[in-house]
Amino acid sequence: MLANRPEQSTQKEEEYLTPAEMAQFLKISMVTLWHWDKKRITRPLRIGNLKRYRKSDLEKIIVEFGKHVG
């Protein structure tokens, strides 16, 4: 019977970063991060009054900037 089988998760669980963690990883200021949010370079999630960034988005930003820099 399939109803009682535990779900097998093939995807890893998404990790989320605070604005301070995101800025630290990117080595930018909080003001720059705010500007990037306004320019839609970064796309924070809103959870109530909190902002969170997907770690997978951070990795995409790093790859994208690597193309432009190097």
Image (cartoon, rainbow, N blue to C red):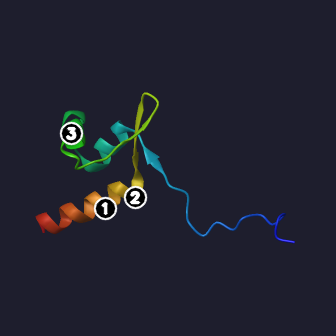
- Residue holding disc 1: 60
Q: Label 2 vs label 3: CA separation? A: 19 Å
**Which percent across, then down, holds residue 64?**
22, 63
**Dot 1 crowding, Cα within 10 Å, few <14, some 14–19, many 20+:** few
**Dot 2 crowding, Cα within 10 Å, few <14, some 14–19, many 20+:** few
Mark 2 / mark 3, whichever is N-terminal: 3
Total residue callouts: 3
Q: Label 1 vs label 3: CA separation? A: 18 Å
Residue at 82% over, 65% down? 3
Q: Which mark is residue 29?
A: none
Task: Choose top left, top right, bottom left or bottom right for residue 37.
Answer: top left
Q: Label 2 vs label 1: CA separation? A: 6 Å
**Which percent across, then down, holds residue 36?**
20, 43
Residue found at the very far left of the displayed protein: 69
**Dot 3 crowding, Cα within 10 Å, few <14, some 14–19, many 20+:** few
Q: Looking at the picture, which amino acid does disc 3 mark? A: Lys
- Residue holding disc 3: 38
Residue 15 is left or right of residue 31, and the answer is right
Residue 29, relative to residue 62: is it above or below? above
Residue at 18% over, 44% down? 39
Frontmost residue, 63 versus 9: 9
Local secondary structure at mark 3: helix
Residue 14, relative to residue 34: is it above or below? below
- Residue holding disc 2: 56
Residue found at the very far top of the displayed protein: 49
Kindly check if marks 2 and 1 are in contact, taking CB atoms under 8 A apart as contact.
yes
Frontmost residue, 32 versus 50: 50
Local secondary structure at mark 2: helix
Local secondary structure at mark 1: helix
Frontmost residue, 30 versus 44: 44
Residue 70 is left or right of residue 23, and the answer is left
Residue 21, relative to residue 13: is it above or below? above
